[in-house]
Amino acid sequence: MGAMDMSINKQSEVAANIQIGPTDQGMVRIYIEAEGGVELPLDFDADEAEEIAEELRAAADVARAMAAAQSGPKKR
C-alpha cells in the first residue's frame, strides 16, 4: 500500500519545515517543505483553520497527559 501504511503513531526520519500564515486570497496556508524537494502548500478557509487549531490543541493536551502518566509521579 505504500504511503497508506504510514500511521499517525509511526515515527519518521524525514526532516521537514512548516510555515503557517495567511495568503493574499484570504486563506490560511500550511506550507510543508520536506527532504527531497517535496513542497506541499495546503490552503484552508478560516473556519477550517480554526478546526485544525482546535484539533492540535486537543492532541497536545492528550500528549501532555500521556507523557505525564509515563513519567510517573515526580520525586521531591
Image: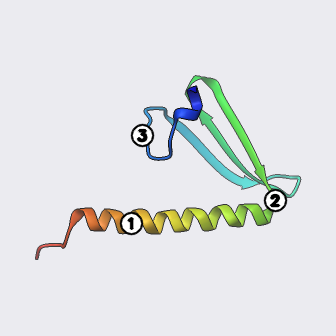
In the image, is residue 61 above or below residue 44?
Answer: below
Q: Amino acid at mark 2?
A: Asp
Q: Secondary structure at mark 1?
A: helix
Q: Secondary structure at mark 3?
A: loop
Whole-percent x, y for residue 29 in the image: 74, 50
30 displayed left or right of 8: right
Q: Nearer the viewer, residue 44 or 33?
A: 44
In the image, is residue 44 above or below residue 37?
Answer: below
Whole-percent x, y for residue 15 in the image: 49, 34
Rendering quarter of residue 69? bottom left
Q: Mark 3 — residue?
A: 11
Q: Amino acid at mark 1?
A: Arg
Which quadrant of the rendered structure holds the C terminus? bottom left
Hey, which residue is sitting farthest top in the picture? 36
Sequence order check, earlier mark of 1 and 3: 3
Q: CA distance from mark 2 to mark 1?
A: 28 Å
Task: From the image, state whether disc 2 or disc 3 is nearer to you.
Answer: 3
Q: Mark 2 — residue?
A: 45
State the residue at coordinates (62%, 35%): 33
In the image, is residue 21 above or below residue 40?
Answer: below
Numbered badge on residue 64: 1
Which quadrant of the rendered structure holds the N terminus? top right
Rendering quarter of residue 12? top left
**Color encoding of the figure:** rainbow
Sequence order check, earlier mark of 2 and 3: 3
Rendering quarter of residue 35? top right
State the residue at coordinates (44%, 46%): 9
Whole-percent x, y for residue 50 in the image: 70, 66
Q: Amino acid at mark 3?
A: Gln
